[in-house]
Amino acid sequence: MKKTKRNPKTKQSEEKEPEELKRMKVDEKAGSFPNDPGCTDTYTTHKHAKEIGLKVHGQGKPVRLFVAGLHGDEWKDTTEILQKIEPPEKGTLAVIPLVSRGEYISTLDPAYYPVMGADILKAVETLNPEVYIELHSYSGENLEKLAGRDRLERIGVPAYSVLKAGVLLGSVSPWIRRGYFPKEALCLSFEIQKGNPLSREFVAGMLEVLKKTGSRDEFIEYLRKEFPEQAKKAIEDYRRFYGEI
């Protein structure tokens, strides 16, 4: 996938909302990107318009972007979590509760983000988030495929770490991690066990932590304290795959 050049970052005052965030504020009814010449009214007549649209809460730094319902029927276990999340006390929280109800195309497929995930890329390029989180869901019989030690050899990416209540933690697809984020950004993928309310509850709690997180290093310290074994594995996997943190 061709990498997209990111605009140089400029210092933003926390008291003044950046202009690009103002442009990204979403009309609750439309659920689309306002003031965009290339924007269509597709979502205004969609019966799930309020679920699909990007919504931006708060202002200033740090900027966090949470997305859910990326493909297939994963929205059934993930979308509502982002619909219920409250604005942050500090900084910006942008959410896309439902990316796509379309067919299941893996985010490891280089065609996913330019097509099904186009709105994700648009939000990333506009907002330049320091924290990027994807919510996915999995069936219990696929646990070994996601968290098995041989995952790197099988499909070329590190295995997920098992946290609690069936929740798995890993990095996002290298297609978006390498192409759209600097190395100091925090980019995580959570896998929620389908049909497990405890799994959804636990992830909702993790998002509350991440909603208050200002940097990658801050969350790593939290993870080391609360989940030392998983933190060690995640850091080792990241270093082997991407290089030094």
Image (spheres, rainbow, N blue to C red):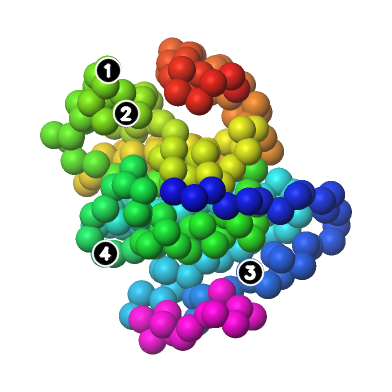
Pick whichever, 79 or 177, lies toward us.
Answer: 177
Residue at image coords 51%, 19%: 239
Q: Position of residue 38 (x, y in %)?
A: 54, 80
Q: Is residue 95 left or right of residue 70?
A: right
Asked whether the residues under the numbered discs 1 and 3 touch, taking CB atoms below 8 Å apart as contact, a structural biologist would say no
Magenta residues span 33-46
Farthest residue to the front: give it.
2
Q: Which residue position holds label 2?
A: 156
What whole-number distance in Å separates the C-alpha atoms at marks 4 and 1?
A: 30 Å
Whether residue 218 is situated above or below residue 14 in the rendered picture: above
Marked residue nearer the N-terminal end (3 or 4): 3
Which percent across, then down, holds residue 168? 35, 31
Numbered circles on residues, count? 4
Q: Nearer the viewer, mark 2 or mark 4?
A: 2
Residue bearing the label numbered 1: 149
Q: CA distance from mark 1 to mark 3?
A: 41 Å
Say which label, 4 or 1, has the lower sequence index: 4
Label 1: which secondary element:
loop
Please say if the residues under marks 4 and 1 sit with CB atoms less than 8 Å apart. no
Image marks 2 and 4: residues in contact by CB distance under 8 Å: no
Q: Examine the image and state in which quarter residue 229 appears.
A: top left
Quarter-of-image position of residue 169: top left
Upstream in the sequence, badge 1 or badge 3?
A: 3
Disc marking residue 24: 3
Q: Is residue 160 visible?
A: no
> Mark 2 vs mark 3: which is more N-terminal?
3
Q: Is residue 75 visible?
A: yes
